[in-house]
Amino acid sequence: MLSVLFGSKCREQVLQFILANDTGYATQIKNFYLIGLDPIQKQLEKLEFGGVLVSQNVGRTIVYSFNPRYAFLEELKALLLKAREFYKPELKENLIMIRKRPRRQGKPL
């Protein structure tokens, strides 16, 4: 949807994932979208270099989140949310319903 503006569908996917989860790391995003790791890592690096994202090391993992000092952060989030309205229903639901912790053992589905 926004790949024309962002220059890459992968960049839009990375931003949508981080918007939905507040944070994200490359392998987590790769597993969600089922795409290659290298393009995701490149987009994360470009977005961090541009000041849109910030990173922090958590053990051996680099976790990314939106830079609260980015001048157009609220506008970017509004644009991403508006674009999400036009996504397929399954993708919208998956973005919203990402599990952040494991299911209790024995809990019914």
Image (spheres, rainbow, N blue to C red):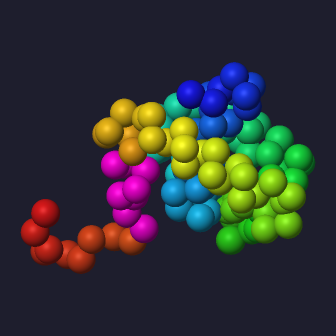
- Say which of 100 and 37 sits in front: 100
| Residue at 54 percent of width and 44 percent of height | 82
Residue 52 location in percent, x, y? 80, 53
Q: Which residues are magenta?
A: 93-100
| Residue at 78 percent of width and 68 percent of height | 68
The residue lying furthest to the left in this view is: 108
The residue lying furthest to the top in this view is: 4
Direction from residue 14 to residue 43 in the image, left or right: right
Residue 104 location in percent, x, y? 24, 77
Q: Relative to 61, is 50 above or below?
A: above
Q: Quadrant of residue 24?
A: bottom right
Q: Is residue 39 magenta?
A: no
Residue 72 location in percent, x, y? 81, 54
| Residue at 43 percent of width and 35 percent of height | 87
Q: Quadrant of the N terminus?
A: top right
Residue 50 location in percent, x, y? 88, 47
Direction from residue 28 to residue 108 in the image, left or right: left
Q: Relative to 94, is 56 above or below?
A: below
Q: Is residue 99 magenta?
A: yes
- Whether residue 94 is visible: yes
| Residue at 71 percent of width and 59 percent of height | 74
